[in-house]
């Protein structure tokens, strides 16, 4: 494996490190807090497996017939606790009913974001909801492979680069794998997220146990965020939260996200899920502020499963042109002052960094483009 000349060439999925049979590759965070592979040349046997599983060196399939839907889960409690229309939960419950396993991004003990394995409906809340942080996939590729080899159904949901990496890691198709990827704006730095969690914990003198990035209590498609520290819940607009402000201002995304090759409907997964942007122009009767999912079914397997779950949702079929939101057309550009921002992150104490990067300080430069 060559070392990266440009950071944009690595999406940080970690498949290369997990695929390496000699343990020659480790994922190591850089100064911005994104993980990159580091190679120990003395242990490398040049087998080429790291290249074979790299999604950045492969091309997703383009020549497929696809179906496009707008979807809302009928169970309102599920929809309220989901980011969009709650389709992920419907698919996950279906797979759990088959005694299968679900993988999604959840919080760890210190609020770090990582993929987790779920086998019971009562655990689903671990992996529900969007987390605007790059999730750690360590150990997940092998765990999915083991479940599949044991003959279990597996639903995996993640960013399109992670889902594509998983497909390459497995190296062959499995009838019982349901691969789900997301429409994705980009993933922010895990270290900046970790610093922000610690900052809030210091400020409120307690331990954080939850952070909801898209809280829908105002029936506004989740333009509030909320978090719990100790026994107290804190709620604010996402535009008043510095972490969300940096994310939407394009300061904290991984460099590869600005050149993302998955900003298209042409994916290799079974389903793609996202927010149905522009629903107000397509179906006003479903535009209620509580979330509607965009669902793209890419495969025959997706078509079969759709037939089995569609009684649990309100839905309509539409055309490709109805769903083409900006993130299915092109990646977001980095903020002009991203370098300055990251430099300040490296050198300033975090509380000072927050003051220095407050909304008004960054506003002059911000290219706002919310998900
Ligand atoms: C970083 C990020 C950016 C996004 N940007 C857009 C966008 O620009 N446009 C758009 O239409 N939709 C975007 N989405 C997708 C959208 O927010 C919803 O996740 C999606 O519509 C599914 O919602 P749901 O209601 O079906 O289920 P939810 O219960 O909300 O399920 C969310 C699913 O996403 C997975 N997930 C959550 N966080 C992460 C993460 N950090 N990494 C990998 N997987 C994760 C969870 O495991 C779960 O499977 C983004 C999601 C993420 C994580």
Image: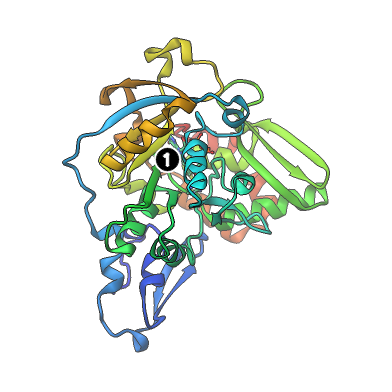
**Above-or-below relation of 218 to 225:** above
Judging depth in this view, the residue of 2 and 170 nearest the camera is 170
Q: How is the image coloured?
A: rainbow
Whether residue 299 is visible, yes or no, is no
Q: From the Cβ of disc 1, is ligand 1 less than 8 Å away?
A: yes
Instruction: Estimate the x, y position of residue 235 in percent, counting from the top left.
Output: 72, 33
Instruction: Estimate the x, y position of residue 265 in percent, counting from the top left.
Output: 28, 37
Judging depth in this view, the residue of 359 and 329 nearest the camera is 329
Number of labels in the image equals 1
Whether residue 318 is visible, yes or no, is yes
Q: Is residue 87 left or right of residue 351?
A: left
**Above-or-below relation of 44 to 206:** below
Instruction: Estimate the x, y position of residue 304 in percent, counting from the top left.
Output: 32, 37
Q: Is residue 153 left or right of residue 242?
A: left
**Above-or-below relation of 238 to 51:** above
Judging depth in this view, the residue of 61 and 148 nearest the camera is 148
Per the image, the residue denoted by label 1 is 185
**Above-or-below relation of 147 to 183:** below
Q: Secondary structure at mark 1?
A: loop
Residue located 36% across and 58% down the image: 166
Q: Is residue 195 left or right of residue 231?
A: left
Q: Is residue 107 left or right of residue 277?
A: right
């Amino acid at each position: 494996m060559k070392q990266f000349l440009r950071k944009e060439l690595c999406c940080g999925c970690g498949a290369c490190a997990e695929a390496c049979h000699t343990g020659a590759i480790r994922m190591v965070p850089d100064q911005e807090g994104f993980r990159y592979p580091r190679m120990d040349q003395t242990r490398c046997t040049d087998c080429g497996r790291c290249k074979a599983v790299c999604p950045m060196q492969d091309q997703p399939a383009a020549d497929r017939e696809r179906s496009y839907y707008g979807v809302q889960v009928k169970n309102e409690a599920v929809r309220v606790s989901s980011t969009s229309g709650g389709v992920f939960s419907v698919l996950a419950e279906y797979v759990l009913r088959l005694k299968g396993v679900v993988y999604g991004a959840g919080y760890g003990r210190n609020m770090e974001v990582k993929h987790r394995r779920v086998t019971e409906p009562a655990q689903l809340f671990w992996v529900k909801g969007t987390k605007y942080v790059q999730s750690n996939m360590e150990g997940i590729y092998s765990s999915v492979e083991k479940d599949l080899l044991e003959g279990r159904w597996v639903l995996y949901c993640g960013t399109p680069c992670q889902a594509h990496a998983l497909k390459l890691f497995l190296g062959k198709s499995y009838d019982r794998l349901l691969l789900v990827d997301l429409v994705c704006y980009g993933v922010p730095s895990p270290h900046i997220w970790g610093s922000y969690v610690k900052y809030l914990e210091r400020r409120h003198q307690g331990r954080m146990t939850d952070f909801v990035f898209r809280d829908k209590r105002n029936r506004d498609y989740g333009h509030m965020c909320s978090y719990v520290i100790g026994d107290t819940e804190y709620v604010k607009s996402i535009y008043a939260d510095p972490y969300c402000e940096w994310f939407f201002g394009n300061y904290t995304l991984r460099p590869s996200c600005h050149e993302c090759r998955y900003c298209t409907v042409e994916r290799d997964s079974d389903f793609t899920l996202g927010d149905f942007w522009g629903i107000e122009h397509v179906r006003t009767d479903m535009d209620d502020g509580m979330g509607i999912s965009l669902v793209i079914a890419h495969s025959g397997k997706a078509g079969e499963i759709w037939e089995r779950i569609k009684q649990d949702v309100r839905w309509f079929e539409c055309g490709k042109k109805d769903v083409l939101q900006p993130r299915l057309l092109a990646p977001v550009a980095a903020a002009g002052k991203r370098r300055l921002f990251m430099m300040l992150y490296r050198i300033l104490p975090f509380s000072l960094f927050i003051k220095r990067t407050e909304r008004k300080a960054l506003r002059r430069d911000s290219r706002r483009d919310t998900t």
